[in-house]
Image: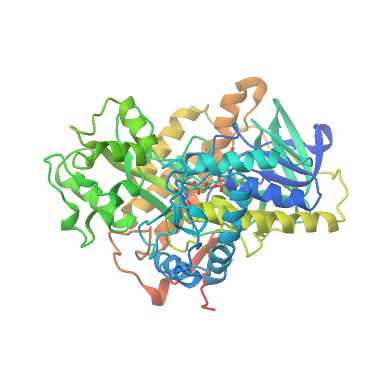
Amino acid sequence: MFEPLTQRRYLLSFKAAKLPQQITDVLVIGGGVAGLRAAIAAAEQGVDVLILTKDTIDQSNTWYAQGGIAAVLQPRDSIDAHVRDTLEVGVGLCDEKAVRVVVEEGPRRVLELLQWGARFDKKEGNPYDLAFGLEGGHSFARILHAYGDATGKELATTLINTVRGRETVRISEHSFVIDLLTDNERCVGALALIDGQITVIWARRTIIASGGAGQLYRESTNPKIATADGHAMAYRAGAAVRDMEMVQFHPTTLYVAGSSRALITEAVRGEGAYLIDRTGYRFMQDYHPMGELAPRDVVSRAIVEQIRKTNYTHVYLDVRHLPTQQFRERFPQLARLVDQFEIDITKQPIPIHPATHYMIGGITADELGRSTLEGLYAIGEASCSGLHGANRLASNSLLEGLAFGARAGKDAARAARESDLQFPLKIEHQIPPSSKTELDIADVKSSLRSVMWRNVGIERTGERLAETREIIAFWSRYVMDKTFNIAELGKEATIAGWELQNMLTACFLLTTAAYKRTESRGAHYRLDHPQRDDAKWRLHLQWRRPAEEPERCVIRDP
Ligand SMILES: Cc1cc2nc3c(=O)[nH]c(=O)nc-3n(C[C@H](O)[C@H](O)[C@H](O)COP(=O)(O)OP(=O)(O)OC[C@H]3O[C@@H](n4cnc5c(N)ncnc54)[C@H](O)[C@@H]3O)c2cc1C
């Protein structure tokens, strides 16, 4: 029997009445694709919207997205084909209703981006003269990109400009949301650190769009903001989270000591790049008939295996045989990146390694983005809408953010208008002082990320998962009983402390779910249970505080 996680309802002591207060109709936590699209939809209904982002608005997974956005926009493509591709990659865990929502609404969401000024790459002769690319898992070339490999930045810029044109929307950057406020099992807003002060935001409806969890791992493509804050605060507040064991790893990120793990898009392999090991051997044919174009999880595992076989730290992506100028034009961001590290791609292969990329699991949400907690919505990477199932089809996540963002924003605005909530409410929470030792936040964070990468990464075993859970429970005992005080620690260390507490909660759920799922499916691979087991495991593991065991939600086909 495992030790339960040390867990409190709130991360800090407070009396709402004594704190600075703000009121809004709709609070949006996060300014990536999902949050921005939700804010636009809510503002269109005439309600007040407040967007909070923990860093500047350009620090999001959205901003760094490279490859593209998938949508059915060509006459020979079909909704059914995109749905089928998504279901196939999700290996039995997708919710077909959610898949249809995203795929059917996708074209409309993309066309409105064009109206708002997005400049996707063009090629004459296609509908709207757009250039469509093909990516792994898609049966049709339906991926739009912008400036070659800067799709996310173009999308984010377009949405930010559109939001800034709406009078009823306010954006507050550098505003860290600590916890959701609940009253009678209903979400009524959040506590946030704004301008150095803990502030109460009363909201008739709250939308979590706080993105992913890549920072739970040492190797990650995600920016620093991705510390699973939304997952953890929703869990603390009593909302259900599910499929937490499902984490997607990307096979090819730049591996240069000291640099961030910059992603090298799949499209590079699509253009003909080879994967070679330290001896120059092209190894992918040994692992899969599709070679370098095998599914992401297969390529990631093959790289790990080849690294082990060659007793080395990484492998290489070889583009020496490709036409250099064409390559630089198609992948300008990548070309700039290799230049920075003085890697001459005409003479040297690019050092690469897999890294954590996308959090598939998240806050359980329905077809309007509503969580299981009244008043709270969850969208984008922080949510688990059922679109991705056990694995994510490439270029489906930006589309998910747009589709569910638009739906949740509209519904939240409607519900906020009809709401009879009266603010302020009397909410307070008291935490006794910690009796445990002082804490080196940076050290625990770094150890946690390392142990997650080693034991809860691409290949997992029951033994290692159980051991990791014990380690997390042990760290939690002295991290979770702390409160962090800005006056004592300063803003940066205080936020780092809250992030660490959120990370421990998310890691605990992720590791426990990975331990419990004794099969391999999609992104979850167990060396000790390498087969898929539909009879036993075609279900979601769903967690809801204060229960210590997950609910098992069986999937019913429509
Ligand atoms: C390198 C890279 C490449 C990718 N390429 C693609 C691609 O080609 N196609 C594709 O479909 N997907 C791609 N993805 C995935 C995709 O970018 C993300 O899944 C998607 O952008 C998530 O959007 P989001 O709005 O849910 O979250 P994000 O864009 O991550 O935004 C999260 C927001 O929440 C805020 N936030 C977080 N915590 C707090 C807090 N405590 N308080 C206040 N604010 C908070 C952040 O400040 C940020 O504004 C890629 C991801 C990465 C990292």
| Residue 158, x across and y down, in percent | 60, 42
Q: Residue at x 35, y 38 (%)?
A: 329
- Decide if residue 297 is on the left or right side of residue 406: left
Q: Quadrant of the C terminus?
A: bottom right
Q: Nearer the viewer, residue 39 or 251?
A: 39
Classify 260 as above or below 232.
above
Q: Nearer the viewer, residue 117 or 346?
A: 117
Classify 174 as above or below 138.
above
Spot the residue most to the front: 125
Q: Nearer the viewer, residue 440 or 452?
A: 452
| Residue 286, x across and y down, in percent | 15, 57
Classify 476 as above or below 173.
below
One can see residue 412 in this view: yes
Colour logic: rainbow
Q: Residue at x 66, y 33 (%)?
A: 175
Instruction: Report which quarter residue 480 is drawn in.
Output: top right
Classify 194 as above or below 404.
above
- Decide if residue 517 is on the left or right side of residue 230: left
Q: Quadrant of the N terminus?
A: bottom left
- Decide if residue 423 is on the left or right side of residue 538: right
Q: Residue at x 77, y 54 (%)?
A: 413
| Residue 384, x across and y down, in percent | 55, 58
| Residue 536, x across and y down, in percent | 41, 74
Q: Residue at x 69, y 45 (%)?
A: 28
